[in-house]
Amino acid sequence: MERGKKMGKLPDFIIMGEMKCGTTALYRYITDHPKVEPAKRKELAFFHAYYDKGIEWYKSQFPDCEQCMTGEATGYLKFPNVARKIHKVLPKIKLILILRNPVDRAYSHYHMHLRKGIISIPFEKAIQGKSTYLDKGIYVRKLKRWMEIFPREQFHIVQSEKLYKQPQKTMDEIFKFLGLPRYKLNVYDHHNAGSYSKMNSETRKKLVDYYKPYNEELYQLLGEKFNWDQ
């Protein structure tokens, strides 16, 4: 290490979530708090992609401040094998998990790929067979493995729908979980649900039914229920 070069601190929290669940908005809200400083990048991907760089490199990605909190927002949920690595380095880390109705998540994911030209087939064909769009919404499969490593009290669950409908109330709960004083948000993210056509009602019903057993298992695991059956 270079003489006089300040190293950062290890993170106090990690935001986890699948693609299209709202991790970017949530990270922006949290780091807007005056007692929170952001990492050099929102997604550091250290524990699954850059672990060989070492802990000192990881620390260097965060601010060097004793009085602030800091964290990152890598989608580690989909990498349950890294849970033990994280526990070894950060046994007391606060884990914030943001989850979105898996039906809406799948449709949003599909439309993102459609806009980018990655896919051109109709949604109904894109979700046939073994579909990544659907698989990413089976949260319980991955979360069960995380909860074998970390106790429930180290997790705070955020519903994406509530974050957009009640941002201040949702953030008050998160700040409390992090041990931070209440802070009034300066900017709100506007979730534009109307940026693409509405899903076919029959397709939606099929997907609600598809996810129902997985969601019920998730509710039991978390000890709380979401309004995702519609």
Image: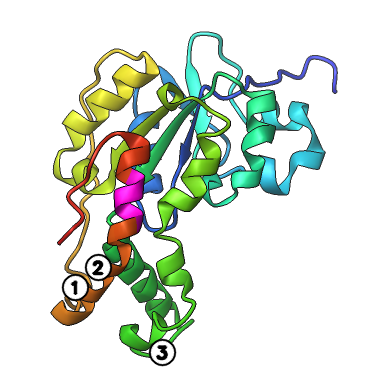
Q: In the rendered structure, which disc, 1 or 3, sits on the residue that comes first in sequence?
A: 3
Query: Could you tell me residue 94's position as x and y percent?
Result: 47, 24
- Label 2 sits on what residue type? Asp
- Could you tell me which secondary element the residue under label 1 belongs to? helix
Whole-number angstrom distance, CA of label 3 to CA of label 2: 26 Å
Residue 6: image location, x then y, percent:
71, 18
According to the picture, the residue beneath numbered tag 1 turns out to be 205
Q: Quadrant of the N terminus?
A: top right
Q: Residues within 10 Å of mark 3 (few under 14, many from 20)?
A: few
Majority secondary structure of the magenta segment?
helix
Residue 122, can we see it?
A: yes
Report how far apart the C-alphas of labels 1 and 3 lie in the structure.
23 Å
CB within 8 Å, label 1 to label 2:
yes
Residue type at mark 3 is Ser
The numbered disc on residue 109 is none
**Residue 209 disc label:** 2
Which labelled disc corresponds to residue 120? 3
